[in-house]
Amino acid sequence: MDFKEFDAIIDARTPAEYALDHIPGAVSAPVLDDAERVEVGTLYKQVSAFEAKKRGAALVARNVSRHIESLFKGNAKRWKPLVYCWRGGKRSGAMAHILREVGWDAHTLPGGYRAYRRWVVDELERIPARFELRVIHGPTDSGKSRFLAALAHAGAQVLDLEGLAAHRGSVLGGLPERPQPTQKWFESQLLAQLQNLDASRLVFVEGESKKIGELQVPEALMARMRTSACIVLEVPLDVRIELLLDEYRHFVADRGRLDAQLDCLAPLHGRSRIAEWKALAARGAWPEFVTRLLAEHYDPAYRRSSMKNFKQLGGAPRVAIGSMAEFDAAARRALAVQAGEHAHVLHHAAPERA
């Protein structure tokens, strides 16, 4: 679906529907709010279709009028919006009709959100195969996200899955200031980012498991990542401890939250070990706490999962990063090496001229 020909995308569904997922960039302009939709639906079931339509028409007219006087007030006559609702039917059709009567060139999305959602699923099955990926690996808190950010700053194409998922991918990876999006909204944003990438250039992405927090990485992208070339970060323990304490400082301030997350690991490690970790945190022995968490939980899990699932990890080149200050320089070096290798592959893959 190409939405570039439209000046605006308008989501006419309820705020609750919009919050679950919507076309990226769409403006929420409900023709019925959540309570009004329930009211009309109840009338339809308990009284009659006629009474429901009569009440719905009054509410829709009132709400569209309010949007025209606020959201759409400053738009010139040449404004061309695309309106959608659940199935491209009555709600979007009613709004588009009124907008056209004003003089705007309003269109509706055939099939509505349901058609859009099917398209997202289909595209996420198809589009990952277009890209040549470089998958960044390294044990937990070796700075993979920081390295990705440094690559982006150096001009590389980067796909930040943890940023989209609002989660750092580990048992302590939740972000207190950002709840995770819904699965559908995660996939909508992911597809939008993939569409903006240049398939002729390398794309750098962090090696992930199938789930990031509560969200599932689409299967085709996961399969593409697992067969792609890798880069492994080598970071000394003291830097990893510094990185973890920096990223998870909210747990230092909220011991109750930390204890609750550690309890999730009890089936793997037993209550006794969890109690030892909690005791270290309780007395503020944070470097020792982090060292044990890395050595006893994260590193063994990384070795079990990554070597099994990522086919090219064993022979992957290493990038040594000795301090927090070295990420930018390391990213520039890695980018230069990878760009040279990519150009070499493209040169040898080019067909010979007659």
Image: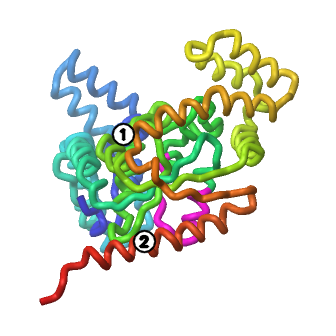
Q: Quadrant of residue 255?
A: top right
Badge 1 amino acid: Lys
Q: Is residue 304 magenta?
A: no
- The image shows residue 166, relative to residue 193, as above or below, that is above
Q: CA distance from mark 1 to mark 2?
A: 36 Å
Q: Is residue 148 magenta?
A: yes
| Image quarter (top left, top right, bottom left or bottom right) of the C terminus | bottom left
Residue 314 makes an appearance in the image: yes
Q: Where does label 2 land, which residue?
A: 341
| Image quarter (top left, top right, bottom left or bottom right) of the N terminus | bottom left
In the rendered image, residue 304, in percent from the top left (x then y), is placed at 49, 32
> What number is the disc on residue 151?
none
Mark 2 element type: helix
Q: Where does label 1 land, which residue?
A: 184
Badge 2 amino acid: Glu
Residue 64 makes an appearance in the image: no
Would residue 321 appear left or right of 192 to someone viewing this image?
A: right
Query: What residue span does the magenta drawing correspond to?
Result: 147-161
In the rendered image, residue 221, in percent from the top left (x then y), is placed at 34, 47
Among numbered discs 1 and 2, the one appearing first in the sequence:
1
Answer few, some or many: residues within 10 Å of disc 1's Cα (few below 14, many 20 plus, some between 14 and 19).
some
Which circle, 1 or 2, is nearer the viewer?
2
Mark 1 element type: helix
Q: Residue at x 77, y 28 (%)?
A: 289
Front residue of this view, candidates 5 and 286: 286
Q: Residue at x 29, y 48 (%)?
A: 124
